[in-house]
Image (tube, helix red, strand yellow):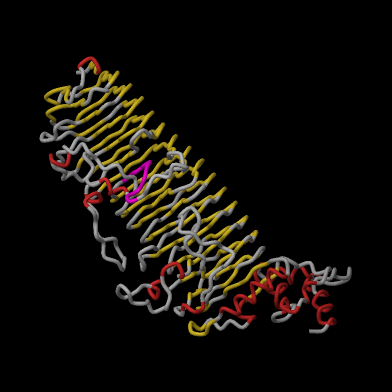
Amino acid sequence: MSINFVKKARGLFAKPAVEQPVSNSRREWLAKMSVPAIGATVGMGLMGKRASAFGIDSRPDDHTIGAKVYNIRDFGAKGDGKTLDTKAIQAAVDACTKDQGGTVLVPAGTFVTGTVELKSNVRLYISAQGILLGTADGKQYYAADAIPLSGDSTLNDGNVGLFFAVKANNIIIEGPGTIDGQGSQFRSPSKGVMPPAGITGPHRPYHLLFHQCKNLTVRDIYLLNSAFHSVRVIQSEFVKMEGLHIRGRVINNNDGFHFISCRYVHLTNCDVQSQDDACALFGSCKFVTVDGCSFSTRWSVFRFGGGEAENITVSNCIIYETYGCPVKMRCGPGSRFENISFSNIIMRDVTGPVSIGIGLQNGQSADPKKAPGIIRNISFNGITATVVKPVPLRETEHPSVYNPGEIFSCVTLNAMDDVYMENITFNNVQITFPGGGTTEQGAVRDVPKVAGEYYQIGVPPAYGIYARNVRGLVLHNVSLSIAATDERPALIFDHVEDAAINGLNVQGDAKAESVCRLTDCRDILMTAARIKGAAPVFMRVEGRNNYRIVVDGGDISKASKALELAAGAQKDAVKMRII
């Protein structure tokens, strides 16, 4: 390309002479071209193919620095669905970041690729008919060695990405196009047999992998069939995920979003259909908002594990066909979960709607160097849920096997020994449970002291809410119903202190021992309670350590007996003023 050509190109934008007719002015020329066309022309056409790769646009007087378009076809990409285009895509990214950023354009076509590293100031735009197709050849993926590996879930258990970035700033991935990971090629046909791609376990690529990045935006794209988690973000800040459609049900641990120790994260208007955790927040995630999203999965939607998670809000979301646990918090020794709010959530056809636990998981040994976990200030406001018996997840390539604790599930607040969770609030909550529990299941007192998966305590003895070791529990306008008979109590408190229950609307069963069962509880105030359906006993109080339990007002007339004392409970521990 000659300097004269560049001068002529610049001449197109020169100020016209005074005597020049309006019809030949730059105004008319600009009006005839769309904004994208101008950008493409300035970025590539006027400079010639692959101009940026040769440094022509690095001139100090080039006014388009940082705003050029780098079409991957101009770097050799074929987009025929067969040719491996990794080198061409990487070359476009490298040229873009070298020229102080711009847009790497994926036009229409199917571009097969292995691992590509994204870099600072790069905007990857995938056009509507553009597909980035992860190759089924596992040899084309490589690990990002700068991302440390650890079996600790608060750090990382994989460092391979289809697209990845490390310590990069100002990255945008957007457009109406698709990134397809061909995840089924990474699934073993049978145990011990290598999958078609030739790699398995943590060597499989995530769709998108980011480590210690800042100012990261991903929006509007379709993320299909990842070989591992779809979006994994580690120790990054100022992250926006907007308008994404994630669908991954081809391999067991198809997570949707997986954040590890991230801050200032905002998810809006995303739709996730996953096989595993839909939105995991591990490690020390802080200042996180999730709004206007929908989720469906076999396992958990919002899963918290390890670290210090705080200042998080989830609002205006729909959780449907989730046959695991919509909200699952597992707080082991040394961890802290605090100031987390869920509001305006619809849960339709789910199991185990809320499970919060502090303590050791099965097989885990106590570490004397770590303090017990802390959970406090967790609120649920405006929740409507329909709990069902689990069924196979639609459109998944995996069979579903369910544990007894998943078939019979409830809201579980489970701390143990001398550890208490604090300040848990349920406000304006309506939950319908499937029923089917037996008298024997409801008679269980020795609930296993584990805080692993929500179902590991076995069949919960309550059909509605089971709370153990909770201090500062508020239930306001909570309605618990059953679709079929259930012979378990609706509500069981075990070592609960400082609880305020107002406007409890609960369904009883004629064969259940009681509607509510309290064991060694203190400072409980229940007002305006109401029973739907006949019941033999409204409240059964057990144990010698109950103190200041007050039931004031309400209508429990459908219970044959208001109060029953057992296992050494004292009459003066309970005061009732009811209809």
Which of the two residues, 48 or 184, is positioned nearer the viewer here? 184
Which of the two residues, 364 or 344, is positioned nearer the viewer here? 364
Left or right of 349 in this view: 564: left
Q: Position of residue 540 (x, y in %)?
A: 19, 26
Residue at horizontal 53 percent and vertical 45 percent from the top: 286
Based on the picture, tell me whether residue 531 belongs to the magenta stretch: no
Q: Report the span colored magenta.
A: 353-363
Which of the two residues, 298 or 61, is positioned nearer the viewer here? 298
Residue at horizontal 55 percent and vertical 69 percent from the top: 126
Left or right of 117 in this view: 368: left
- Quarter of the figure with the N terminus: bottom right
> How many labels, in total?
0
Residue at horizontal 50 percent and vertical 44 percent from the top: 308
Looking at the image, the residue that sits furthest to the front is 368
Based on the picture, tell me whether residue 355 belongs to the magenta stretch: yes
Which of the two residues, 506 or 472, is positioned nearer the viewer here? 472
Q: Position of residue 50 (x, y in %)?
A: 70, 80
Q: Position of residue 368 (x, y in %)?
A: 44, 42
Left or right of 215 in this view: 150: left
- Quarter of the figure with the C terminus: top left
Left or right of 465 in this view: 52: right
